[in-house]
């Protein structure tokens, strides 16, 4: 049975924060850390982002609340009510709680009628994991509709008041590079997709033709992580005598090993080529390639490697990202991108899209092929 994205919603907290105000929110941690800001933002191409904390470094919006607001926004654009939801699938990199699961918290926040829930966990692909669960349940006829929602709130881990006890790497108290640059890269927000067994009665829906999630964790070391002091340590945050000890050792800091990122480019293109060789899509017919990537520099790395390999790809102007305006929202990014494409009327019946979400956690890649359709059979 076909599955269709019939409505989307997003929630971006507060007002857009320009580059020059970033440290008004997350604070300063050593001169060397601040010196990274301009270089990091220049590479990323980010101009504004959204924060769920205020300038006093106090949390204004939880992950749970942002996710619920995105769901409400999607349902408000749809032909169903909250109590009609059959399934909530929710993903996040760092949920509010260790337990219970993210979907349970979102369901409680929404207060809708009893329904099935599923929580997915990972890094950037946790949102695609949630969406695939929703897609498959519709596809096999298990559910009539499902809400998939992805949310991120990493800013809480970047606050200077939280990192004041992390052991510095120099006399000025600056953080290690793998922690420091992420303070300027990541932002907060949520996106939601309503998936149904039929297209919406009016307007354009997106038929999910297929969705793949492929792990390449067997091919390299952990790249992005939260819970270890370094990616070779066998001592996780649970293993410290106290939470304060874990915090001081950096085991409760989000990290990314920059030296491993070229491997993410490699496996991402490997997966693209595998799907292309299998005849899963035609790059020449794509209207858009909605892509989640952490920086414009990363996009250029991908394009250069594709050119070096001679890999057929769509024109550069087919790539679609809103990274400069909303920042890097991790697993919620692809949802917010698709919400923007739909709300701005950028697709017509018959248009096809290939969504791409690479994850640096321990390396995985997700692709999703969509076709714009209408209820009367156009597309």
Image: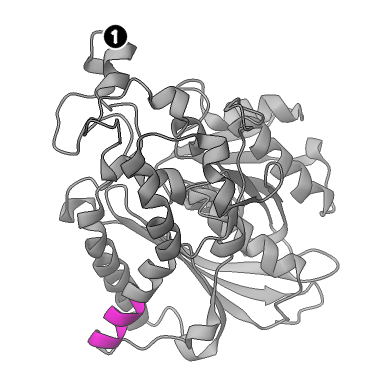
Position of 12 with respect to 242 (left or right) is right
Q: Position of residue 185 (x, y in %)?
A: 45, 51
Magenta range is: 302-308
Residue at the location (62% across, 46% down)?
A: 50
* The C terminus sits in image quarter: bottom right
In the figure, residue 267 lies in which quadrant? bottom left
Residue 81, relative to residue 278: is it above or below? above
Position of 108 with respect to 278 (left or right) is right
Q: Position of residue 115 (x, y in %)?
A: 67, 32
Q: Is residue 129 magenta?
A: no
SS for callout 1: loop
Judging by the rendered image, the residue that carries numbered circle 1 is 242
In the figure, residue 222 lies in which quadrant? top left
Residue 69, relative to residue 242: is it above or below? below
Is residue 250 at all visible to an observer of this figure? yes
Is residue 1 at all visible to an observer of this figure? no
Residue at the location (56% across, 51% down)?
A: 20
Q: Position of residue 181 (x, y in %)?
A: 36, 48
Residue at the location (24% across, 64% down)?
A: 262
């Amino acid at each position: 049975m076909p599955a269709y994205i019939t409505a989307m919603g997003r929630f971006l907290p507060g007002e857009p924060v320009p580059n020059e105000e970033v440290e008004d929110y997350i604070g300063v941690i050593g001169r060397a850390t601040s010196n990274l800001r301009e270089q990091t933002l220049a590479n990323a191409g980010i101009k504004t982002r959204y924060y769920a904390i205020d300038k006093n470094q106090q949390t204004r919006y939880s992950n749970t609340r942002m996710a619920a607001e995105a769901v409400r926004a999607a349902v408000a654009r749809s032909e169903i009510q909250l109590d009609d939801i059959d399934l909530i699938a929710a993903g996040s990199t760092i949920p509010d709680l260790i337990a219970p699961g993210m979907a349970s918290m979102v369901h409680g926040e929404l207060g809708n009628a009893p329904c099935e829930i599923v929580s997915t966990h990972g890094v950037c692909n946790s949102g695609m994991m949630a969406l695939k669960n929703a897609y498959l349940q519709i596809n096999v006829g298990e559910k009539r509709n499902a809400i998939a929602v992805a949310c991120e709130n990493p800013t809480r881990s970047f606050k200077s008041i939280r990192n004041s006890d992390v052991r510095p790497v120099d006399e000025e108290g600056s953080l290690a590079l793998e922690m420091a640059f992420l303070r300027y890269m990541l932002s907060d927000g949520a996106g939601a997709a309503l998936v149904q067994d039929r297209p919406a009665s009016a307007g354009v829906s997106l038929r999910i033709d297929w969705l793949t999630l492929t792990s390449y964790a067997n091919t390299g070391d952990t790249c992005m992580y939260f819970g270890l002091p370094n990616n070779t340590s066998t001592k996780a945050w649970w293993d410290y005598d106290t939470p304060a000890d874990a915090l001081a050792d950096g085991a409760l800091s989000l990290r990314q090993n920059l030296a491993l990122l070229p491997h993410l480019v490699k496996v991402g293109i490997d997966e693209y080529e595998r799907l292309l060789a299998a005849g899963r899509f035609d790059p020449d017919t794509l209207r858009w390639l909605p892509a989640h990537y952490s920086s414009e520099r990363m996009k250029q790395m991908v394009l250069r490697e594709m050119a070096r390999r001679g890999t057929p790809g769509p024109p550069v102007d087919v790539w679609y990202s809103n990274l400069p305006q909303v920042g890097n929202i991790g697993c919620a990014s692809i949802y917010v991108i698709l919400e923007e494409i739909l709300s701005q009327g950028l697709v017509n019946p018959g248009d096809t899209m290939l969504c791409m979400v690479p994850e640096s956690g321990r390396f995985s890649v997700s692709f999703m092929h969509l076709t714009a359709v209408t209820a009367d059979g156009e597309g």
